[in-house]
Amino acid sequence: MDGEEARAYLPRLQENILQTLARSSLEADYVIDACDALARQINEEEHLPLLCALGLGKQRAKDELRTAKAMLSRETLQKRMEIELALPQTQFTDANGLLYTHTLAPLGVLLHIAAGNAHGLPVYSVIEGLLCGNINLLKLPGSGDDISIVLIEKLIQIAPRLSEYIHVLNFPSSDVPALRELAAMADAAVVWGGDEAVRAVRALADVNMRIIEWGHRLSFAYIVPDMTDDTALVSLAQSICEADQLLCSSCQGIFIDTESMDVLHAFAQHFINILADVSAKYPSALPFEAHAKVTLEQHTQSMLSMFDGTHIYAKGGVSLHVMHDTALQSGMLMRNAWVKRLQREKILQTLKSEKGYLQSAALLCSNTDYNELCTMFTRTGIARIRNAKNIQNSYGGEPHDGEYPLRRYVRIVSKEERGN
Amino acid sequence: MPNDAAKELFSHKKPYDHAGTNGLFIEAVRENIAFHRKHCADYAHILKESGFDEACLRSITDITRIPVIPTTFLKQHALYSMPEDKFVIRAHSSGTQGMQSRVGIDRTSLALGVRMVWRIFSQNRLISPMPTHYIMLGYEPGGSEDMGAIQTAHGASRFAPALSRTYALQRKKDGYEVNLEGILGSLHRHASGIFPVRLLGFPAYLSKLLQLLEDENIKLRLPRNSRIVLGGGWKQFSGEEISHKTLFKMVKTHLGIEKTHIHEFFSAVEHPIAYCACNEGHFHVPIYSRAIVRDVHTLEPVPFGTPGLLSFITPMMRSMPLVSMMTDDIAVLHKNCTCGNASPYFVLFGRARADGLITCAQQSVREAGKAI
C-alpha cells in the first residue's frame, strides 16, 4: 500500500492489529510450513532477474537464491528455534512453595525498517518476527524493494492466515508524522541500516518502544608480525577478494601489533604482492560503475597521500593504505585495505571507543598468542573471532552480531499457577 | 607573453576546428601548467611526485600524460594559484558540506570564458536582442556564493534581454519552495504575448513540468523563437530520466517548441567549459578543451567507442590548476557525428558508484543460511 492510501489506512490498521491480537495466535509450525513451501518455490528463472536488476552479478545472485532456499527450509528454521529460544528451566518454586511457569510469548507487533540498500532483507526480518508469533509492519525502503514484495506475496498465497500478520506500507521516510503513528502501534522497531537509519528510528520511537538495531558493523584483521607465515596471509587475501569486503564480517583493514612505521611499510610491501596475486585469481563480479568508483577513490587517496604523509601501495587493482593513526575505520571496500599500528597493550583503550560497531576480528598469530588475544578482543566488545580464512564464513546456530535474533522478538511470561 | 597562446585560442573564429588549433592548444596548456607550477606550491608538488614536466608536451596525444586530478580530490584539498580576493566569481559544486569543490575564477580567465560562451551561444543562435521572458527551472539566486548551476543559469538568462524571470524554486526564509502555480501562470500569460519565452534549467524539472502539463491536458503554443536551454544533467533524478525523443515530443505537444530550439549543455564547476549538444543530442568538444575517456582500472586513455571515466584538459583557468580534471561520470567518446560537426563528442552513461552493493543482508543471509 502506497503513499496517500497508506496514510489513510493507518487508523484502520490499528483496529486490525487489536482484532488480530484479541482473536488469533500464530503457531510456529504454520509459519515453518509456509517458509518451507516458499523455499521450494524459489527458482532461478523467476527470481534471478529480480536480483540481477539490483546490480548483483549473476554468480552472486545465484548464491543468494541458494542461501535463501536453505535459510527458509524447515530444517534450518526448526533448529534455529530450538537453539535460540531454548528455556533450560520453565518451572520454578519460590521460598513459599508457590509454583511458577515460564512460557514464551511474542512481543506483539514489530515494525521493520530497512535502509535503501538492504534488498531482500526485510523478508528475513519479517519471517523471524512471524516465527515468534508477532504481527509485522514493514515500512519499505524509499527506493522500493521488489524482491521482498514478491516473496511476501508468495508467502501469503501459500499461507493465507499470514495476511493478518504482515502489513506492508510504503510512504517516504520524510513523512515523519505517519511514521510516528506507525511506530506508536508497535512494541518494537527492528532496524536494518547504517547510523543514519538507526538515528532516525531512535528519534521516531517513543520511550516505551523497544529498538532492536542491526546496524553498521566493522571487522578487521590483527596480525602479529614475525608470527605469521605466508599461508595465513594468502588466506587473508582470499577473504578480502572473495566478497570484495562488502559484508559486515569482511576485514576493512589490518592492525599490526607494532609501534614502528617501518614494520608497517615492510608488511605492506610484502602483502601487496600476495593480495595482487590472489586478486588476479578471483575475477571480480562487480559492475562497471563500481570499478570506476574504486579506481577513482584509489587515485584520490594516492593524491591525498602526497600531502598527508600516508602511503598507498597499489598493484593490479588492489591497494593497501598505510596510515599513521590507530583508529578503526570503514574502508574503501573492493579490495582496498587500510594498514595501521595497534600494539596489543593498547587494544582495549583503542577499540573500546568503537563500542557497538565491533563485529569480527581475524587473528593471524601463533597458537600461544591466539587465546591471549581472544581474551583481549572479547573485552573490547567483539562478537566473532576467527582465523584469517574463516572470517566471513558462518555455520548454523551462529549468533547475529552477538545475539540470537529470535530471542529479541519474544517475551518470557512468568505465571503463577493456581491450585497451589 | 604568458597566456598569449590561450588568448589566441579563445579568439579563434571556428570553435570546433581541432585540426587548425592543436598546436595552439598544446602551447596554451604548456603555458598554463608552467603558470600553476610557479604559483601553486601544492600543484608543483603533485607534478613532482608524478614525475611530470610540461616540456614533454609536443604532440596532442602527449596531453594524456598530464597528472589528472579527480574532482573528489579537489573537494577535500583545494588548490589555488592566486589569493582568493582576486576571484571575481565564486561557486561551489553540489555535495554535502565539507565535500564540495569551492571554485573561483579570476578576471583574465573570465574574459576567456566569456569569449568562449559568446562564440558557442552565437553558433547555436542563443544570442538575441529580443526581449525575452524567462522561466527558470531551477533555484532563485540568493547569496554571493551560490552553487555553480544557479550562477550559470542566471548568466544564461542574459543572452537575450530579460523582461521577466519566474523561478520554479523560490527562495524563502528557511529554504526553497516549489512555485508551480507561478510557472503555469507565467506560461499562460506569455503564450499569448509577442515576446519569446525561454525555459532554462535542469532537465528533470522540465520533465516534471511537462508531466504536469500532460496530466492537466494543457497544450500551449509559445511565441516564435521561444527556446529551451537545459543543463546540469539529471543528478539525483537519474532514476526518472526520460529519453530525448520523449522529451522533444512532449515539448512540441505542450509548449509548441521544435527540437531545433531545444539546447542542452554540459559543464562542471571544476571544468567550466560549455559543451553544447548538437541536433543529434551529442556533446561536441570545442577547441578550448579536450576530452579523454580513461580505463576504469588503469586510467589509461581508451580508444573511441570504449566506456570509461570522463576527464578533461583545458588551459582556460589561471585561478586554480584545473588543467587536467577527472569527473566521476562514465562516458564514451565518438567521432563522425551525423550532424556534420567534425570534432569528437562524448555520450554520458551514468556515474561511478558503488552504493547498492553494500548490504548487511548479505551477511545475515550467509549467517543464517548455512545448512545446519
Image (cartoon, rainbow, N blue to C red):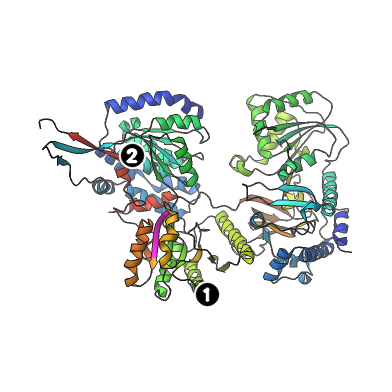
Q: Are marks 2 and 1 in contact (CB under 8 Å)?
A: no
Image mark 2: chain: A
Q: Where is residue B370 in the image (x, y as percent from the top left)?
A: 32, 54
Secondary structure found at label 1: helix
Image mark 1: chain: A
Looking at the image, residue B125 sits to the left or right of residue A97; the answer is right
Q: How far is disc 2 from disc 1 in space, using C-alphas?
A: 52 Å
Amino acid type, label 1: Asp
The answer, for residue A72, to whether it is visible in the render is yes
Q: Name the residue under label 1.
A: A262
Which quarter of the rendering shows the C terminus of chain A? top left
> Magenta region's main secondary structure?
strand
The one nearer the camera, B158 or B176, is: B176
Instruction: Examine the structure image and report whether residue A31 is included in the region drawn in magenta.
Output: no
Looking at the image, residue A143 sits to the left or right of residue A391; the answer is right
Kindly indicate the quadrant of the structure image that contains residue B236.
top right
Q: Mark 2 points at which residue?
A: A129
